[in-house]
Image (cartoon, helix red, strand yellow):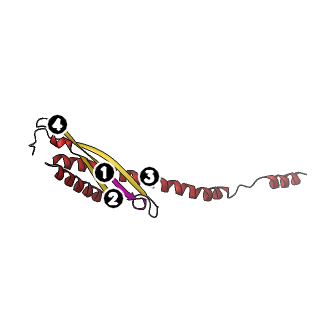
């Protein structure tokens, strides 16, 4: 009788050999997608930081300019240079400046602000082959020297 019980227990016992392998195979694609998503989000954040740096550079260059026309030109050049140095190529880069601070009376501190809008391909900034574009808009401002000669 004991031999029959032992044989019966062996038959009724669930076998778990290899179940870990099956679970790993089932979870591997989910883990891979999660890792790719985190990489994409991190690279988008880096592109956003590069755009902020470009906005800062544009505002600073505009605040050092003597005229409105020169301020816009200098801001465009600074933003382009900053984005290219960071390794990002904008499909379109728009730089708008508010240069009212250049015209304040001598002795008063003015401020020049810049707003840049950069449109990037997701395949360039996130993951190769990812369709779509990402538009980043960033603002920055820079003070104008209160005692600098005015035109």
Q: Secondary structure at mark 4?
A: loop
Residue 105 sits in which quadrant?
top left
**Is 61 above or below relative to 146?**
below
Q: Which residues are magenta?
A: 116-126
Question: Where residue 120 appears, x then y in whole percent?
Answer: 38, 58
| 14 sits left or right of 145 in the view | right
Front in this rendered view, residue 127 or 93: 93
Which label is found at residue 41? 3
The Cα atoms of the two marked residues, 4 and 1, are separated by: 23 Å
Residue that carries the numbered disc 2 in the rendered image? 92
Residue that carries the numbered disc 4 in the rendered image? 109
| 64 sits left or right of 27 in the view | left
Q: Secondary structure at mark 2?
A: strand
Tell me if residue 30 is in the magenta stretch: no
Tell me if residue 36 can be seen. yes
Tell me if residue 122 is in the magenta stretch: yes
Q: Residues within 10 Å of mark 4 (few under 14, many from 20)?
A: some
Q: Residues within 10 Å of mark 2 (few under 14, many from 20)?
A: few
Decide which of tag 3 and tag 1 comes sooner along the chain.
Answer: 3
The Cα atoms of the two marked residues, 4 and 2, are separated by: 33 Å
């Amino acid at each position: 009788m004991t031999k029959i019980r032992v044989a019966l227990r062996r038959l009724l016992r669930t076998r778990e050999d290899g179940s870990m392998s099956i679970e790993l195979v089932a979870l591997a694609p989910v883990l891979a997608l999660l890792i790719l998503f985190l990489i994409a989000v991190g690279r988008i954040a880096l592109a956003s930081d590069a755009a902020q740096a470009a906005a800062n550079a544009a505002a600073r260059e505009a605040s050092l300019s003597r005229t409105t026309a020169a301020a816009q030109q200098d801001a465009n050049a600074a933003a382009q240079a900053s984005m290219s140095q960071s390794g990002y190529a904008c499909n379109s880069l728009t730089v708008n400046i508010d240069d009212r601070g250049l015209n304040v009376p001598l002795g008063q501190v003015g401020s020049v602000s810049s707003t840049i809008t950069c449109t990037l391909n997701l395949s360039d900034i996130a993951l190769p082959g990812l369709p779509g574009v990402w538009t980043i808009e960033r603002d920055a401002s820079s003070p104008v020297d209160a005692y600098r000669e005015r035109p």
